Amino acid sequence: MTNSTPEASTLETLIYGWLIFGLVILYSASLPEGVKLYQQPLHFVGLQLVWVVIGLACFQIIIRLPLSFWWRWSPLFFIGVFVAVLLARFTGVSLNGAARWIALGPFNIQPSEFAKPMLVLQTTWVLNRWPRLPSWARTGWCLALLGLVGAVLAQPSLSMASLMLCVLGLMIFMSGFPLPWLGGLLLVGAPFLTLKVATTNYQTSRLTAFVDPFAHAQGSGFQVVQSILAIASGGLWGVGFGMSSQKVGTLPYPYSDFIFAVFAEEFGLVGVLAFLSFLVVFTWTGLQLSLRPSTPRPIGLLALGTTLMLVIQSLLHLAVVTSSVPPTGMPLPLVSYGGSGLVAALVTAGLLVRCARESGQARLEILAGGKP
């Protein structure tokens, strides 16, 4: 079951294309900051290439090992990530008021990034075994899954926790649980999310700035206003690759949180529509795999979760840079600068490709056996 299938090859091509696109955009978006902060124009791209090598090594390992291996060890992986998120919260490195990183030598690792693929993997494990699990195990795993989301929220990382809660809820709903279960999940999660926003000063100010960013253009609305100006400057065709003016000392974090604003300025509406079309193709390919009747249930659930995790995060990033939602610091998968985020996205993508390989092989075996 190690041979690739046409669907898996398509997904691999899309993922490699996404990764190359990300490196090209990062090159343009990070040049001024590289010179300004490190006197090295390729500083961010050079470090990102190191993480690309690590991420692609993880990607290749994942797509070559059977899903049975990853599910066998998923509870241990899940617990390990949970502990790492807690360690980052209480003993990790703080930046901009958030404790999300663990220092490992010269690198800072963000465990909450790896919590995303591990949440999807373990949720699939739990949902597939749900009918056979005793009541105490069901309760325990429900608390553990929600607990991981809560631990990410406590760092605080409202955007990451919201993304994880959204994907968790959709996976539970699509696995066949009644709609009231999804409502119950929202009733549990929404008060905690609301409380976190209300008790965290910078998140409250971001919400205020979102309502009227231009009224706070020199304060809490500065990021959003500069992002809007960058996108508006792009017009229909853009100002040209590398020619963004907003990235030069004006747009905050042009290489990470607002990298799509730089892309929109340089490639215009045409470029934005092209990227959205790419996301539609990627989403369609992943959902077609997950919802196909011949796809075994656990493989379909894992394909659904990994597809949603990458796509919803991408849409949230686009929503932030266009001021459609409050600014939350959501990176664009496989594009924004950040080693942990890049490797975690490739781990997620690797699980999706592995699903395509095994689903395709299962379908070929059914056809070879003459079964409907």
Image: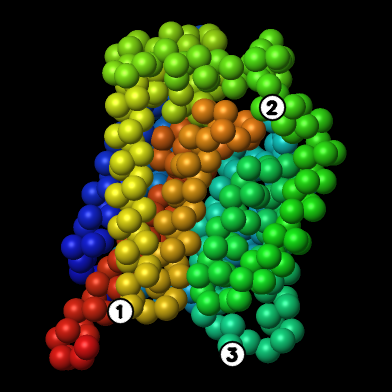
Which residue is tagged 3? Answer: 132
Left or right: residue 155 versus residue 350 is: right
Which numbered tag is attached to residue 294?
A: 1
- Mark 2 and mark 3: span between their CA atoms? 48 Å
Identify the residue at horizontal 32%, vertical 72% (top origin). Answer: 292
Could you tell me if residue 183 is visible in this image? Answer: yes
* Marker disc for residue 243: none
Which quarter of the figure is the N terminus placed in?
Answer: bottom left
Check disc 1: other Cα within 10 Å, few if <14, some if 14-19, many if 20+.
some
Residue designated by label 2:
211
The x, y position of residue 61, in whole percent, is 35, 60
Q: Report the front residue among 120 and 320.
A: 320
Q: Nearer the viewer, mark 2 or mark 3?
A: 2
The residue type indicated by label 2 comes to Val
Residue at point 35%, 59% (across, down): 286
Q: Residues within 10 Å of mark 2 (few under 14, many from 20)?
A: some
* Residue lying at 68% horizontally and 65% vertically, measured from the top left: 183
Name the one closer to the observer, 70 or 368. Answer: 368
Contact between marks 1 and 2 (CB within 8 A): the answer is no
Query: How far separated are the C-alphas under marks 1 and 2?
Result: 47 Å
For this orientation, the residue located farthest to the right is 199
Q: Secondary structure at mark 2?
A: helix
Q: Position of residue 256 (x, y in %)?
A: 50, 29
Q: Nearer the viewer, mark 1 or mark 2?
A: 2
Q: Tell me which corner region of the image, top left, top right, bottom left or bottom right, holds residue 323.
A: top right
Q: Looking at the figure, which quarter contains the C terminus?
A: bottom left
Q: Is 306 left or right of 122, judged from the image as shown?
A: left
Compare marks 1 and 2 and give the one earlier in the sequence.
Answer: 2
Can residue 19 be seen in this snapshot? no
> Is residue 184 shown above or below 176?
above
The residues tagged by marks 1 and 3 sit, at their Cα atoms, a distance apart of 23 Å
